[in-house]
Image (cartoon, helix red, strand yellow):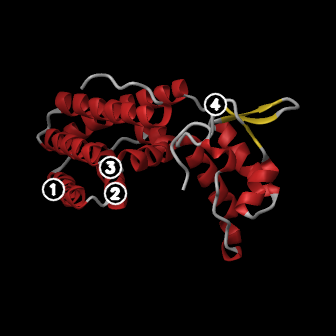
Amino acid sequence: MIEAKQGVGRVAAFERIDPAFQLTVRDHVYRAIRSAILSGAFATGERLNERQLAEQFGVSTTPIKEALRQIETEGLVETLPRRGIAIRFSMQWAEEMILARAALESMIARLAAKRIDKPSGAELLATVDVMKAATKSGDADQLIALNETFHDHIHRSSRCGYLAKLIERQQFYDASIRRIIHLDPAERQKALDEHTSIADAIVAGDADLAERLMRNHVVRSGETYLSIVFGKQKTSE
């Protein structure tokens, strides 16, 4: 397990891959390294050693190189001439990502409030009810899955094609953030309260309120992530 602290990743113990899953090696490596970066396991500017990573995963350097090339297209790492690959991800990068997601999600929530039908509204409220039970039991893994289901419901209800496409590349960012945040019982309860209010506003057709609540929710949870990963002091709530 990778700790959410800067600089921990230099000796991170990545799991070796079972040979039976060789067809998905590149995807596995890509997801694991990307998640480690977003969880703060590597310091900004830290260089990655492809051979060392290959040894940790128990694979050749080929899937490592392919995964890093893909991660570089997302701006999380960069190739330095004659110096290898370095971590580009930083607190500033994370802040910008959070603000971008807040803008997109809030607009999607606004449109969902205008376009949602009764069956979809009932499904969204039912998801919130399941989230209440999972919050009470402290099942973080279930809550992470339900969180994704909740936002997927809103995306579908909004019938947004363009905005939904823009936010696709942030989905794995969100999973990394949620896994860190849901370890804290107080944060789990805050998230539940916010999700409940957002769902109620959408089902009630209150577009202004749905937009505002969603933006506040994404920014607040993002600040929690920044506090955990980068040690940034949170603003007063």
From the top left corner, tell me how far across and down residue 146 is, in percent: 31, 56
Q: Report whether residue 213 is seen.
A: yes
Number of residue marks: 4
Q: Residue, x 46% and y 30% (percent of image)?
A: 231
In-front residue for pair 22/125: 22
Q: Which mark is residue 44?
A: 4
Q: Residue, x 64% and y 58% (percent of image)?
A: 14
Q: Secondary structure at mark 2?
A: helix
Within-10-Å neighbours for mark 4: few <14, some 14–19, many 20+:
some
In this figure, which residue is indicated by the disc labeled 1?
A: 122
In-front residue for pair 223/165: 223
In this figure, which residue is indicated by the disc labeled 3?
A: 156
Q: Secondary structure at mark 4?
A: loop
C-beta proximity under 8 Å, tags 2 and 4: no
From the top left corner, tell me how far across and down residue 43 is, in percent: 63, 34
Left or right of residue 176, residue 197 in this image: left
Disc with the residue nearer the chain's start (1 vs 3)? 1
Left or right of residue 148, residue 94 in this image: right
Q: Which mark is residue 140?
A: 2
